[in-house]
Image (cartoon, helix red, strand yellow):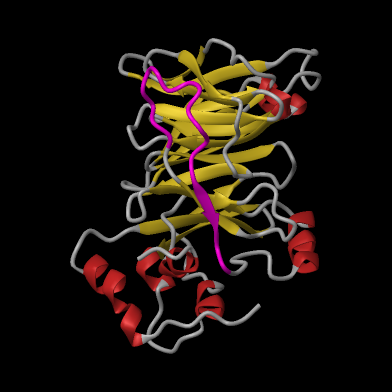
């Protein structure tokens, strides 16, 4: 893949961002024997200086980490983000469900949540939306039934698990999800079922059509491009970034055509698939949501 370099005529987004509130990306990495490190990265650093190699620059993590979490390296360990909190959970039969841990990126504090339910061991999707974390288990993995609960903050009792109405699609067919910029709606696309949305305030499901969003797993809303951004689902070359128009969360939009979307002109990640597979074999690399970088917006043909 050709090297991506920043030139002086691309300085607009960086200069505008420098005058506003700084944005940071938190990255969870299993880089020590007893647990995970949480690194804090300034998103502006991804833009680079004039003539710099963005690929090599983005590969370096600033040290030291802002937090060290002693947590086992195994397939039962799972991470997600709820707003400004990083959620860590795992289920182990020998430990009888350890509590959920919540790291607050604003204060640096670590809070104990409720015990992790056994179903978390079998979940296929962790879906953050509306300040909550939805845990979805696929049929056949846990007692032959689909499973859906939500981890949410309660003003009186703190964080707790609550039941949610089951989705009108088979969870094992879920291909992607994306939170809506209205802050309360999350969209889901499932193979052979189409696209649905969940209102996180009313817990009501709604169907939008038999079409599907073009993403693989999670997509993120980027306000600067006013679109969802994520990895493309059906691309023959893994790692291609895709942007998609945001679907209306209105009441009467079933039957409307699918939203317009476009692919990046070059592959943005997974440059070396063998190296990527090797890295995954040694443990999960958990990356929390961020907005699309200048390089990604440029590849998508957006300002």
Toward the viewer: 261 or 155?
261
Going by the image, does 162 lie left or right of 226? right
Residue 131 percent across, percent down from the top left: 39, 30
Residue 97 percent across, percent down from the top left: 65, 24
Outermost residue, bottom direction? 51
Residue 297 percent across, percent down from the top left: 43, 64
Q: Is residue 82 above or below residue 93?
A: below
Toward the viewer: 25 or 76?
25
Q: Which residues are magenta?
A: 247-265
Location of residue 127 by image quarter: top right
The quadrant of the image that shows the C terminus is bottom left
Q: Residue at x 74, y 41 (%)?
A: 75
Residue 213 located within the stretch drawn in magenta = no
Q: Residue at x 31, y 46 (%)?
A: 107
Q: Chief secondary structure of the magenta span?
A: loop
Q: Is residue 30 above or below residue 139?
A: below
Residue 114 visible in the picture: yes
Residue 196 percent across, percent down from the top left: 53, 23
Location of residue 41 by image quarter: bottom left
Going by the image, does 95 lie left or right of 47? right
Q: Is residue 147 above or below residue 73?
A: above
The quadrant of the image that shows the N terminus is bottom right
Residue 260 located within the stretch drawn in magenta = yes
Q: Residue at x 39, y 85 (%)?
A: 7
Residue 91 visible in the picture: no
């Amino acid at each position: 893949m050709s090297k991506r370099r920043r030139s002086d005529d691309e300085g607009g987004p960086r200069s505008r961002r420098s005058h506003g509130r700084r944005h940071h990306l938190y990255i969870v990495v299993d880089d020590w024997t007893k647990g995970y490190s949480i690194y804090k990265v300034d998103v502006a650093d991804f833009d680079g200086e004039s003539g710099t190699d963005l690929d090599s620059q983005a590969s370096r993590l600033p040290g030291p980490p802002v937090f060290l979490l002693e947590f086992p390296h195994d397939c039962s360990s799972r991470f997600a983000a709820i707003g400004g909190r990083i959620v860590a959970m795992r289920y182990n039969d020998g430990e009888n469900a350890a509590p959920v841990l919540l790291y607050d990126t604003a204060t640096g504090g670590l809070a104990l949540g409720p015990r992790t339910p056994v179903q978390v061991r079998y979940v296929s999707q962790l879906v953050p939306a509306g300040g909550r974390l939805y845990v979805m288990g696929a049929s056949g993995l846990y007692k032959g039934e689909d499973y859906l609960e939500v981890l949410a903050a309660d003003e009186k009792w703190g964080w707790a698990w609550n039941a949610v109405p089951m989705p009108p699609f088979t969870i094992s067919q879920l291909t992607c999800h994306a939170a809506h910029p209205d802050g309360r709606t999350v969209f889901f696309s499932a193979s052979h079922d189409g696209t649905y949305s969940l209102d996180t305030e009313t817990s009501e499901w709604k169907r939008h059509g038999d079409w599907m969003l073009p993403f693989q797993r999670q997509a993120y809303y980027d306000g600067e491009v006013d679109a969802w951004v994520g990895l493309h689902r059906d691309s023959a070359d893994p790692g291609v970034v895709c942007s998609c128009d945001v679907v209306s969360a209105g009441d009467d939009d079933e039957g409307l055509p699918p939203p317009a979307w476009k692919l990046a002109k070059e592959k943005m990640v997974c440059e070396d698939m063998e190296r990527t597979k090797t890295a995954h074999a040694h443990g999960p690399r958990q990356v929390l949501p961020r907005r699309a970088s200048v390089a990604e917006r440029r590849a998508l043909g957006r300002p």
